[in-house]
Amino acid sequence: MKIALVGSPGVGLSALAAQLQSSLSPSDNYRLVDIGFSDAEPTPDAVQALASMDLVLLCTPDPDASAEHLAAYQALRTRLTQQAWAFTLLYGSADARCNSALQAIRFHARDTASLAQPPSLWRWPCEKCSDPECEHRLFSALLKPAE
């Protein structure tokens, strides 16, 4: 599975990549690609690299980030949305970002292993989701007897 770590300058992508690499099992076939952006507009090579990824993890800037970094992040997020590429947001401390990334990777690996084609709808159960189908799946899963 090819996983892109994406973010504006100063979010610590290299450190996150190292932390994830040490947390993932060597037997798993994961390839982490650190795609940092220094400009508000990604290069064509970066866009092509993103298009070939199985999973895109977007690091949000720290709360004290500069206006320039915030603008680069917003432009990158807008570009991902315009291209209709699915991505997962990673925010918080370095450890929180790593934990969120591991959770997303494991979810994606489990989900795509059971499907013939990539999922088209977000299906991650969360407590603050207002999607009725998501709520139905969440509560249906809670009512099932434990295995």
Image (cartoon, rainbow, N blue to C red):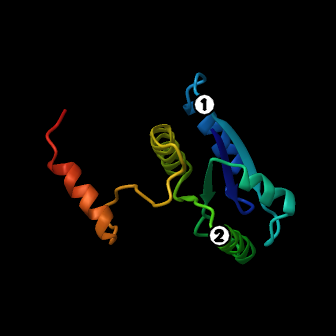
Q: Position of residue 57 (x, y in %)?
A: 60, 54
| Quadrant placement of the N terminus | top right
Left or right of 143, for residue 75: right
Looking at the rendered structure, the kind of residue marked 2 is: Arg
**Mark 1 to mark 2 CA distance (whole Å):** 27 Å
Left or right of 40, for residue 137: left
Among the 4 quarters of the image, the one containing residue 123: bottom left
Left or right of 100, for residue 4: right
Q: Image point 70% across, 69% down: which residue? A: 76
At label 1, counting other C-alpha atoms closer than 10 Å, the crowd grade (few under 14, some 14-19, many 20 or more) is few
Circle on res. 77: 2
Along the viewing direction, whichever of 140 and 15 lies nearer the viewer? 140
Left or right of 105, for residue 32: right
The numbered mark, 1 or 2, whose residue comes first in the sequence reads: 1
Look at the numbered disc 2 and give the secondary structure of its residue.
helix
Q: Image point 46% across, 61% down: which residue? A: 121
Q: Image point 63% across, 47% down: which residue? A: 54
Circle on res. 22: 1
Q: Position of residue 104 (x, y in %)?
A: 50, 48
Circle on res. 57: none
Along the viewing direction, whichever of 10 and 44 lies nearer the viewer? 44
| Quadrant placement of the C terminus | top left
The answer to whether residue 115 is above or below residue 128 is above
Look at the numbered disc 1 and give the secondary structure of its residue.
helix
Looking at the rendered structure, the kind of residue marked 1 is: Ser
Among the 4 quarters of the image, the one containing residue 138: bottom left
The answer to whether residue 126 is above or below residue 129 is above
Along the viewing direction, whichever of 43 and 23 lies nearer the viewer? 43
- Residue reaching furthest to the top: 27
The answer to whether residue 72 is above or below residue 87 is below
Nearest to the eye among marks 1 and 2: give it. 2
Q: Position of residue 143 (x, y in %)?
A: 14, 50
